[in-house]
Amino acid sequence: MPRIPAAERRAALVDAALRVVSREGIAAATTRAIVAEAGMSLASFHYAFASRDELVDELIATVVAREQQAVVPTPEPGRSLRELLESGIIAYFEHLKSDPDHEQAMLELTQYALRSPERHPLAAAQYARYAELARNSLELAAELTGARWRTPVAEVARVLVAFTDGLTITWLVDRDDAGALAVARAAADALSRMADLP
Amino acid sequence: MPRIPAAERRAALVDAALRVVSREGIAAATTRAIVAEAGMSLASFHYAFASRDELVDELIATVVAREQQAVVPTPEPGRSLRELLESGIIAYFEHLKSDPDHEQAMLELTQYALRSPERHPLAAAQYARYAELARNSLELAAELTGARWRTPVAEVARVLVAFTDGLTITWLVDRDDAGALAVARAAADALSRMADLP
DNA sequence: GTGCGACTGGGACGCTTGTCCCACTCCCTC
DNA sequence: GAGGGAGTGGGACAAGCGTCCCAGTCGCAC
């Protein structure tokens, strides 16, 4: 085994843990399973992390920090705000379909964090990040179409997060593409009515 | 310890398990924790159930079967479909606020069921039940206001389930009542536009 | 090149988990 | 009221868990 500085091991272990959680769920993410996925020994784990809890905390913080703008509305002349929002939500849905395990893992990590008071802030940070990303998209979409949000964008963003979250869970359960698209349409419809058109 | 027939023990254990899951999460619902909650011995558990898996399966089936119409729209003259839907969703939200742990438990049971192929149908049944209940409310609401759903009610119901689910998760994370109400308004708005008004 | 600290491997620990066994006791039936 | 099956209690088991220890080894700084 090559020698790897502790900092790099931490990152490698976090990556391995995310793969395990995505593939088999957080309950299966034992120290041994993570270490096997990363191809190292148990001792290396506890050299890099004081405890499994510390790893999970860092895992959550990492995936939140890594969360990217899933969708950037593409400027296409002649499209209404509603159309822009709908295609944005559908683009998120495509992203979900391309890697359902990842979104399921994110959901599981949220639930996990919600279960202990000291970890609750991690879940809150996760959703604050979602809202921030949603807000970016919403502001850009308004800008591109010349619309103006009637209520504070942060509030609209929170609604968008709720809608996409609902779309995610229901689709993960029933894998009904048409149903998910109906949700996307309805969501885009509701959101677009929260703005004044030019 | 009084003698209790196995069938009653099963029910008592399922109830105890639901309390444990609600209070501490599914990960904490060990055979010993459940048995302690029910006030019986470990042997009684395995006399009533062949395995913990069997108990969890029955728990999920039970909570799904037990799920009631959370909200029955109240006939009140002069209210629009939109208003009726909004007050219905808000009534669900009040229900959520009155017992957040229960809804969190339902969410956890869904995730749990999603993680193994043989349990996936349990999650699907859970959401089918949700959709059925949503459908009842939607049909009644349309009837009361004389509106007519433009798309199949089942599809509208699925959208409603997605919206309430999103409302639930986001509120469980940030406990933002005003945000949840904004979701309720937007959802009611979107849904009401899926019907033709009289 | 040597020394020292950063890193590794394997084994072991104590604990909790699900499950099982077996001796026992109650209650219903004939 | 005797017999037998249904139900009970406590202890035990193996397996898996998180964590720890310690002897060893590598590689960089001097």
Image (spheres, coloured by chain):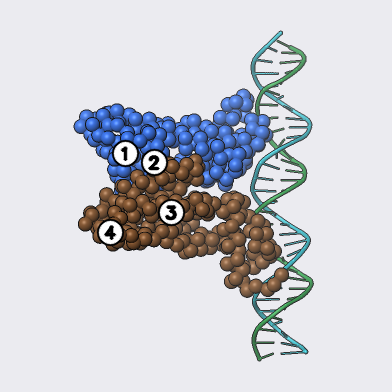
Chain colours: A blue, B brown, C green, D cyan
Which residue: 50% across, 43% down?
B175
**Cα–Cα span, label 3 and label 4:** 20 Å
Task: Please give the residue where the numbered disc 3 appears in the rendered image.
Answer: B92
State the image quarter where residue A91 is shown.
Answer: top left
Mark 4 crowdedness (10 Å alpha carbons): few <14, some 14-19, many ≥20 = some
Secondary structure, mark 2, is helix
Task: Please give the residue where the numbered disc 1 appears in the rendered image.
Answer: A194
Task: Please give the residue where the numbered disc 4 appears in the rendered image.
Answer: B145
| CB contact under 8 Å: marks 3 and 4 | no
Q: Position of residue B91 (x, y in %)?
A: 42, 54
Residue A159: mark: 2
Q: Are marks 3 and 2 on the same chain?
A: no
Mark 3 crowdedness (10 Å alpha carbons): few <14, some 14-19, many ≥20 = some
User: In the image, which is nearer the foreground, mark 4 or mark 2?
Assistant: 4
Which residue: 47% across, 64% down?
B65
| CB contact under 8 Å: marks 4 and 2 | no
Q: Chain of mark 1?
A: A
**Cα–Cα span, label 3 and label 2:** 17 Å
**Cα–Cα span, label 1 and label 3:** 23 Å
Secondary structure, mark 4, is helix
**Cα–Cα span, label 4 and label 2:** 27 Å
User: In the image, which is nearer the foreground, mark 3 or mark 4?
Assistant: 4
